[in-house]
Amino acid sequence: MRSRTVAVLLACVIGACAPAEPPLTLYEFDCGVIRFESVTMFGIEDDETDVRDLFVPCYVVEHPAGSLLWEGGLPSGLAEAGDWVESPPVLLRLDQTLADQLPGIGHALDTFDYMAFSHMHFDHVGVANEVQGATLLIQQAEFDAAFADSVTVPYFDPSLYESLRNTPRELLDGEHDVFGDGRVRIIPAPGHTPGHQVLLVDLAEEGPVVLAGDLYHFRENRSGKRVPVINVDSELTVATMDHIEQFVIDQGAQLWIEHDMAAFLERQSRSTVHR
Ligand SMILES: [Zn+2]
C-alpha cells in the first residue's frame, strides 16, 4: 500500500497524475471498392498511375459523449451480388454491408448519435436510408443541393438518401465541434460538391487525423493540386486545398485520402482501430 502511494506521488511529480482524457476511438470499415478503366475524370492521365481501384471507407468515431458515423459507403444492396457489379463506366463491389460489420464494435445502424457524410455522392451515402435515430450534420449548401427540386450535381442520387429529408439535422454553415471539446470537428471543404466537408479526429496515440473525404481521390491530386473534372467548382476546390493543407500543418495532423486503397491496407495490416 505504502509503495503504491509513493508511486502515485512520484507520478504526480512528473505530471502524470492529471486526470486522463476520456478515450476517443476511430474505427475504419471496408464499405466497398470502385474499379475504373480510366482515371481521367479525376484530372489525372491514365499513364500517371497504375491505381484503378478506389477504396470506399466508412468510419465510426466513439467519443465519451456519443458516437458519430462518418461516411456511408456504397449502397448496401450491392453486397447481394457477392461479386463485381457493372455500373458503367465503373465496376462496384461490396463484400460485406456496414450493418453486418457494426456488431463487431457493439453498434448497429440505429445506435449512432450523429451521422455525417463528406458529401452526398453515391459512394458516400450508401447506408443513409438505413440509419435511424442519428442527427444529420450537414452543410446548408450540401443539403440545399441534395434536396433541390431538380438535383443538378453529378453523382447525386436522391433515392439513396431520401430518408435524410426528414431526419433530425443540424444545418451547418462552417466549422462544427461535434462533441464540444474540440477533438472531433467538421471542417467545410467545398468545391468537389457545394457543401463538401472533412473531419478532424484528434486521437491521443495516433495524433490528429483529417479524414479528407473527396478533397483528393489519388495521391497525384494532392501532390500536383489536380482538380477532378467532375468537381462543381474548380477554383473553389484549389482554394479549399490550400486552406485544408494549412489546417493540416497548423494541427500537426495526418491527412487520410479516404479512397486510397494502399494506405488503408497499410493501416489495416496494423489495426483498423485507432486511438
Ligand atoms: Zn468518393
Image (cartoon, helix red, strand yellow):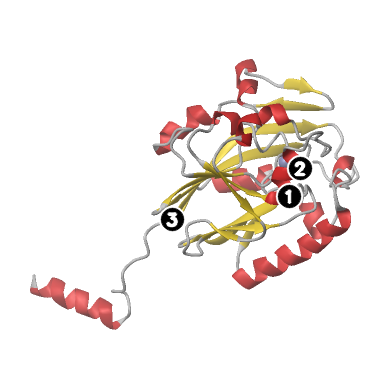
Q: Are marks 1 and 2 in contact (CB under 8 Å)?
A: yes
Q: Is mark 1 within 8 Å of ligand 1?
A: no
Foreground mark, 3 or 1, reads: 1
Residue at the location (73% across, 32% down)?
A: 34
Mark earlier in primary sequence (3, 1): 3
Dot 1: element: helix
Amino acid identity at mark 3: Leu
Amino acid identity at mark 2: Ala
Residue at the location (84% across, 47% down)?
A: 231
Residue 127 visible in image = no
- Ligand 1 is found in the corner quadrant, namely top right
Q: Does the residue labelled 3 lie within 8 Å of ligand 1?
A: no
Amino acid identity at mark 1: Ala
Which residue lies under the disc numbered 3?
24
Binning the other alpha carbons within 10 Å of mark 2 as few (below 14), some (14 to 19) or many (20 upward) gives some
- Residue 163 vs 203, above or below: the answer is above
Distance in Å between CA atoms under marks 3 and 1: 29 Å
Give the side of residue 68 with respect to residue 240, left or right. left
Mark earlier in primary sequence (2, 3): 3
Q: Do the residues labelled 2 and 3 touch (CB within 8 Å)?
A: no
Q: Is mark 2 within 8 Å of ligand 1?
A: no
Residue 253 in the image, given as x and y percentages of width and height: 60, 64
Q: Are marks 3 and 1 in contact (CB under 8 Å)?
A: no
Q: Quadrant of the C terminus?
A: bottom left
Which residue lies under the disc numbered 1?
141
Give the side of residue 2 with respect to residue 9, left or right. left
Dot 2: element: helix
Viewer-nearest residue: 131 or 10: 131
Dot 3: element: loop
Q: Furthest-bottom residue in view?
A: 13
Q: Which mark is residue 145?
A: 2
